[in-house]
Amino acid sequence: MGLLLLLVLVVLLALPVLTVLGSWLTLDADAWAQWTHLADTVLPGYAAESAWLALGVAVGSACVGGGAAALVSLFEFRGRRLLDFALLLPMAMPAYVAAYAYTDALQFSGPLQTGLRDALGLQGRLWGEVRSLPGAVLVFVLCLYPYVYLLTRTALAERAATLLEAAQLLGASLARRVWVVALPMARPALAAGVLLVLMETLADYGVGSYFGLNTMTTGVYKAWLVNGDRQAAAQIASLLLAAVLLAMALERHAQSRMRFASARQSAAGAAPRVPLRGWRAGLALALCSLPVVLGFVLPLLWLAWLAWREWQASGLDWGPRFWAWTGASLKLAGGAALITVTLALALAALQRFEQHGLRAWMARVATRLLGLGYAVPGAVIAVGLLLPMGWLQAVWPGATLAFTGTVLGLMVAYTVRFGGVALQSVEAGYSRIPLTLDDSARLMGASRGRLVARLHLPLLRRTSLAAALLVFVDVMKELPATLLLRPFNHDTLAVMAYQLARDERLSEAALPSVAIAVAGLLPVGLLWRAMRLR
């Protein structure tokens, strides 16, 4: 029975990826002609716009995140400790939420341009269109640079300390210590952070769709929902999946170089930071504060103001709708958190007990697939689940009712997408439980079930709660898979914020957007606490 459940689990976890990749095996003459037409017309545009977007976001996030990490890690100035935490805050702001705020604030008919034109007596547009490729690059950089900042900050604080101190003793100037010693040491961490940013950028649908960009992700939705072409959607999704998997492989290579560098570090501790005074300290404070203000404070305040204005205008009619969306989001996020954490605990315990045999091998395969899911875009997962349902419908019409437009289908998608988040946390918790405790319990006659229930679960309580919280907030923010797979009367905060903003009802989209951003503060606080404890 246990082996059968493992087999079903492996199939479910592998189904989206295998379906998308297998779409190339079912090409007939008509499908190949259609694919050729797609490749000659819209596909080059999708690839080019995605490439330019990725290039701009990579350069911008490397400069902003790497520069902020260098200032906070290597220098001492007034406000540095507060900024050390504050620079993580844009992680709580989904990029599509920030896009709504900046569009409303900076568009031609927005209050800023209107006020400036009236005050200065000007006419016409005062700056470029926000909903454009440069605007999308700016939004992604402001919301995703914390990935680069976090990894680079850790590398500079832990790995470059002794070499910086040695360079200082040898008489190297400050500029030489930074450019020749510190930044090359942080290069693998910088590259890993940039690649994480690229995976998030390529997987995004909310910003690309709202800004009218022709990216690979928006191409998947256009092929499926607009043209009704499932085969073309799967093939575009396979190209997107290949790009994300390449980025993930490069990121793992960069992470392995980080581990190699850390193995050589000395335990001497961190080198003293260089104190900054006067205008240098003010410049450092301004440079580190700017991405926090632009990436979190201003969008949140603007959306809160819009939400308050809408609440005042709509009165009591606004409350029931908002609470209905919130209830749907909480139910889906809570269910997904419970399922993914339970699955992660079961797989981690099975790997701990089973070291050899078929069960151990299948558990390792399921673990790898579960970890891979977080790198797979939600659009790919949705297509990978819907496409086999279409094939199955031809044989068994009632079978698709279980997965198409149901909570069950959403739970499968969430498990594939976010199970790796829970698994990583649970495995980290298990690594801190010595195997000698298991041996002692077995000598006292404890069974596996009793060992897990009475020993492992109490020790993993905090880790499990942290994993559930991370999955909970990720599901609250998730848009692409929810948009395609949600059942009727299950409009979540993310879906409604997107649909209201798409309909140019930005004031109504503000309240669910604020709720999503506030919920995102929970994992940021948890991350900061873990960093401080470390």
Image (cartoon, helix red, strand yellow):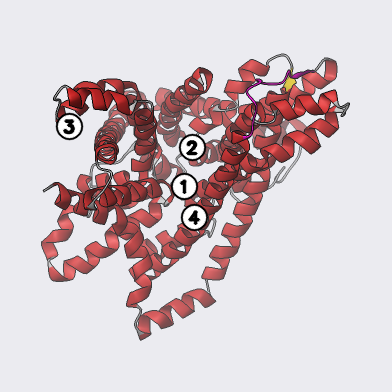
Measuring from the top left, give residue 414's x and y in whole percent.
Answer: 31, 44
Disc 3 + disc 4, Cβ < 8 Å: no
Residue range of the region highlighted in magenta in the rendering: 264-275
Res 45 quadrant in image? bottom right
Q: Which amino acid does label 2 sit on?
A: Pro
Q: In this view, does 66 lie above or below 461?
A: below
Secondary structure that dominates the magenta span: loop
Q: Residues within 10 Å of mark 3 (few under 14, many from 20)?
A: some
Left or right of 71 on screen, residue 214: left
Of callouts 1 and 4, the N-terminal one: 1
Q: Residues within 10 Å of mark 1 (few under 14, many from 20)?
A: many
Residue depth check, mark 3 versus mark 1: number of the one nearer the observer: 3
Residue placed under numbered mark 3 in the picture: 448
Say which of 71 and 427 sits in front.
Answer: 427
Disc 1 + disc 2, Cβ < 8 Å: yes
Count of labels in the image: 4
Left or right of 177 on screen, residue 340: left
Instruction: Examine the structure image and report whether residue 453 is included in the region drawn in magenta.
Output: no
Residue placed under numbered mark 4 in the picture: 244
Per the rendering, the mark at residue 206 is: 1
Residue placed under numbered mark 2 in the picture: 94
Residue depth check, mark 3 versus mark 2: number of the one nearer the observer: 3
Q: In this view, does 7 lie above or below 521?
A: below
Of callouts 3 and 1, the N-terminal one: 1
